[in-house]
């Protein structure tokens, strides 16, 4: 192939990536310009050897590159978004090796020289980011959804592992379900029944005494229907051990101690149990009676169910289980991930408030009516566990819609918030 023949016309990038600005030093404009130059340089370098629009296999064969590098080069040479081009590109050192390979394969000298100049500009631009390529990817994530998703996932994993080291504990799976049930005492209220726990909770070192469960102590007042924390059977006994589902766990009662804290009682795992790297499983169930509104009020159009992890886990599974007579607009419900400091009551229960929100929003997947499809590979006994819960709260699980969200590496300090649009109460009710 005649390497001196021009093989392509410079691509036209959409104007949206180069908006007019009064600031000549706009960093995002610099990134867009670099992405455009980098793509053109790689085309001039490689297309004389492969022809226009080379496939990954063509690039790999000509330059002796592995599959990953070939695919990344192919994408960066064909994409129209300059930010995606930068995100897909190898680091400057890797680009230098690719330029060497192209030169040895017969790429024109002027193309290799031009490519090296662009890579030098790339290296200089990286100096503006304190964390180098990691900082660059963070800036690109504003324009490249794939970059944002990868960066968030990587960051959550790092935070989760760091929390494990600080706390000295880690679980393979954290499971939380919120079962929304019409209140028995007030037709304008909804009870939240929670069945939750940790699977393969392990100690990394002997010492920490984590809180497994905490609950407010309530005194029932005659004729008053305030929210109340109860056992699954509707009792107000303050001992949190009554909320443990022993038949689905592997923890002896003597491994747990009670510690009062203000108006709460906390269930704490003994500091010498379990031994290092010995997995245990803990599940508990409770009812928070009359805790949610059933219908819209003058100042509230939504309700929230807030799931905040106490201990880090590799996999976090959240089930929202809604009685068929409730919340007809919440199918499926909207979910968000909120960070430190979020308090629904101070946010006026508005799902569009982004003050504490992460960019990525988890999705709720419908599992249908009933609990037939509720088992997961990580928790094979889950259907039996939920069946026992429904039996104790005296409800038929076939009367409930089940929605599931699974999130990897959601550490303490973040929470999943389920936003539920409230129905309007008809005048006849």
Image (cartoon, rainbow, N blue to C red):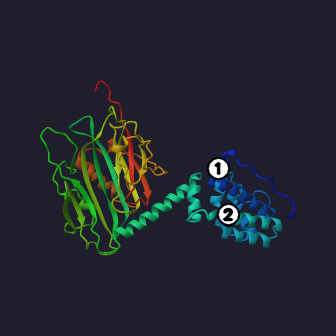
Query: In screen coordinates, is 78 left or right of 273?
Result: right
SS at badge 2: helix
Label 1 Cα crowd, 10 Å radius (few <14 / some 14-19 / many 20+):
few
Residue at point 74% right, 49% down?
12
Instruction: Specify whether residue 379 is in view.
Output: no
Looking at the picture, how far across and down is residue 18, in whole percent?
A: 68, 48
Q: Earlier in the sequence, mark 2 or mark 1?
A: 1
Q: Quadrant of the N terminus?
A: bottom right
Looking at the picture, how far across and down is residue 291, in whole percent?
A: 27, 43
Find disc 2 in the rendering and name its residue: 122
Find disc 1 in the rendering and name its residue: 23
In terms of image quadrants, where is residue 113? Answer: bottom right
Looking at the picture, how far across and down is residue 132, in whole percent?
A: 58, 65
Residue at the farthest left position: 222
**Along the line of sight, which residue is nearer the eye, 399 or 129?**
129
Q: Quadrant of the C terminus?
A: top left
Label 2 Cα crowd, 10 Å radius (few <14 / some 14-19 / many 20+):
some
Residue at point 79% right, 61% down?
44
């Amino acid at each position: 192939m005649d390497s001196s023949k021009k093989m392509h016309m410079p691509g036209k990038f959409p104007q949206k990536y180069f908006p007019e600005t009064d600031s000549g030093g706009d960093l995002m404009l610099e990134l867009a310009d670099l992405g455009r130059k980098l793509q053109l340089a790689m085309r001039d370098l490689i297309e004389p050897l492969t022809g226009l629009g080379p496939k990954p296999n063509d690039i790999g064969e000509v330059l002796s590159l592995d599959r990953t590098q070939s695919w990344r080069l192919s994408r960066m040479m064909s994409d129209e978004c300059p930010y995606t081009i930068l995100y897909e590109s190898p680091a400057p050192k890797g680009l230098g090796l690719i330029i060497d390979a192209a030169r040895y394969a017969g790429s024109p000298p002027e193309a290799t020289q031009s490519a090296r100049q662009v890579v030098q500009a790339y290296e200089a631009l990286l100096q503006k980011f304190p964390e180098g390529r990691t900082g660059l990817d963070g800036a690109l994530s504003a324009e490249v959804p794939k970059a944002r998703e990868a960066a968030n996932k990587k960051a959550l994993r790092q935070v989760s592992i760091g929390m494990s080291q600080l706390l000295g504990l880690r679980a393979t799976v954290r499971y939380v379900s919120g079962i929304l049930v019409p209140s028995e005492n007030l037709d304008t209220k909804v009870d939240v029944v929670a069945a939750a726990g940790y699977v393969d909770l392990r100690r990394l070192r002997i010492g920490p005494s984590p809180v497994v469960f905490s609950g407010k102590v309530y005194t029932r007042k005659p004729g008053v229907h305030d929210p109340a924390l109860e056992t699954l059977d509707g009792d107000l006994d303050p001992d949190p051990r009554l909320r443990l589902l022993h038949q689905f766990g592997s923890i002896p009662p003597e491994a747990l101690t009670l510690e009062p804290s203000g108006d709460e009682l906390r269930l704490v795992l003994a500091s010498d149990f379990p031994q290092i790297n010995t997995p245990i499983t803990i599940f508990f169930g409770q009812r928070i009676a009359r805790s949610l509104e059933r219908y819209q009020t003058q100042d509230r159009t939504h309700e929230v169910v807030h799931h905040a992890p106490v201990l880090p886990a590799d996999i976090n599974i959240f089930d929202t289980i809604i009685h068929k007579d409730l919340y007809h607009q919440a199918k499926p419900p909207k979910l968000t991930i909120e960070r430190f400091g979020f308090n629904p009551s101070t946010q006026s229960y508005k799902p569009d408030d982004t003050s504490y929100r992460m960019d990525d929003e988890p999705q709720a997947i419908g599992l249908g009516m009933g609990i037939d499809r509720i088992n997961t590979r990580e928790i094979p006994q889950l259907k039996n566990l939920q069946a026992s819960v429904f039996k104790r709260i005296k409800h038929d699980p076939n009367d409930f819609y089940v929605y599931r969200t699974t999130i990897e590496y959601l550490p303490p300090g973040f929470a999943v918030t389920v936003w539920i649009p409230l129905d309007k109460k008809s005048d006849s009710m």
